[in-house]
Image (cartoon, helix red, strand yellow):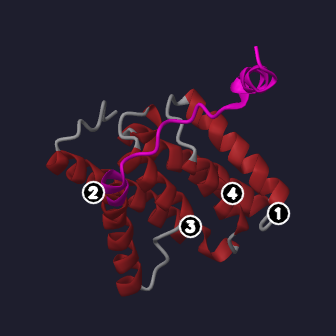
Amino acid sequence: MSDSSSRSHRFDRYRSHAPKRPPFKSAVGATVLLGIPLVLIGLMSDLSGLVLLVPPIGASAALVIGAPELPLSQPRNVILGHFAGIVTGIIGGLLAPGSLAAGGIAGALAFLMMLLMRSAHSPGVATAIMLVMLPTSTIWLTSIEILLCAVLVTLVCWFIHRVRQVPYPAYWW
């Protein structure tokens, strides 16, 4: 066996096992579809003067559009996941507003709540952390907005998948 061939076998275990890149047309299509709920919420933000388009909601929309079959993307998980983040984020924000350590604790406790409720949704962890970082005067309104946006994202993505004839959701609750 040649020296270069034995080297290539030695490094085979380091090759990527990531999924293949989607065709360009599919990637552009998914991007456009993701833009629908994000732009809709952004327009609602612009018209209302409320900050509705926050990073955890964008992450939720990306999960539901990009991987509708995953448990993380199911309506129950999206809504209860953000709810868990809201509960722990409010508590953390009221007890230690602006504390990064409290944000970490709130995020971890949100994840615990999600697991106990059988509704893991990673953007809900971001919701908890974000709420702790906000001024206490805005926590309550922002919490309501996030929960409403989680429901809106679920419904808009459900409609998009329905039109595309993509099976979603696997279960509602």
Instruction: Give the Cα separation between the discs numbered 2 and 1.
Output: 34 Å
Residue receiving disc 1: 99
Q: Earlier in the sequence, mark 3 or mark 1?
A: 1
Which of discs 2 and 1 lies nearer the camera? The answer is 2
Give the mark, 2 or 4, whose residue is nearer the N terminus: 4
Which quarter of the picture shows residue 24?
A: bottom left
What secondary structure is found at the residue carrying circle 4? Answer: helix
Q: Residue at x 40, y 38 (%)?
A: 76
Give the alpha-carbon distance from disc 1 to disc 4, as whole Å: 9 Å
The residue drawn where x is 36% and y is 34% is: 69
Residue at mark 2 to residue at mark 3: CA–CA distance: 24 Å
- Which amino acid type corresponds to the residue marked 4 in the rendered image? Ile
Q: Which circle marks residue 156 in the picture?
A: 2
- Taking the image as shown, residue 120 lies to the left or right of residue 104, namely left
Q: Are marks 1 and 4 in contact (CB under 8 Å)?
A: no
Q: CA distance from mark 4 to mark 3?
A: 14 Å
Marking on residue 140: 3
Q: Identify which amino acid the numbered label 2 is placed on.
A: Val
Q: Nearer the viewer, residue 9 or 83?
A: 9
Q: Report helix, strand or loop for mark 3.
A: helix
Report the magenta residues as a range.
1-28
Q: Select label 3 or label 1 by which is in front.
A: 1
SS for callout 1: loop
